[in-house]
């Protein structure tokens, strides 16, 4: 569903932020 894609996108954004340490 759309919410699943949105959640996946948010999780990926958070992971990128953690990897780069913002």
Image (spheres, rainbow, N blue to C red):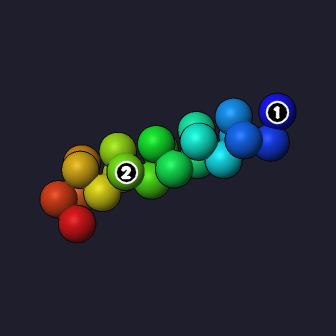
Residue 7, given in percent of the width and then of the height, sits at 59, 42
Label 2 sits on residue: 14
The Cα atoms of the two marked residues, 2 and 1, are separated by 20 Å
- In the image, farthest residue toward the bottom: 22
Residue 3, given in percent of the width and then of the height, sits at 72, 41
In percent of the image, x 80 and y 42: which residue is there?
2
Q: Secondary structure at mark 1?
A: loop
> Would you identify the image quadrant in which residue 20 lies?
bottom left
Residue 12 as seen in the image, left or right of residue 7:
left
Residue 8 as seen in the image, left or right of residue 13:
right
Q: Quadrant of the C terminus?
A: bottom left
In percent of the image, x 37 and y 51: which residue is there?
14
Residue 1, numbered label: 1
Q: Nearer the viewer, residue 17 or 7?
A: 7
Please say if 4 is above or below 12: above
Residue 10 as seen in the image, left or right of residue 16:
right
> Would you identify the image quadrant in which residue 15 lies?
top left
Sooner in the amino-acid sequence: mark 2 or mark 1: 1
Q: How many marks?
A: 2
In percent of the image, x 23 and y 50: which residue is there?
18
Q: Residues within 10 Å of mark 2 (few under 14, many from 20)?
A: some
Q: Quadrant of the N terminus?
A: top right
């Amino acid at each position: 569903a759309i919410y699943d894609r949105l959640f996946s996108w948010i999780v990926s954004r958070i992971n990128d932020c953690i990897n780069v340490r913002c």
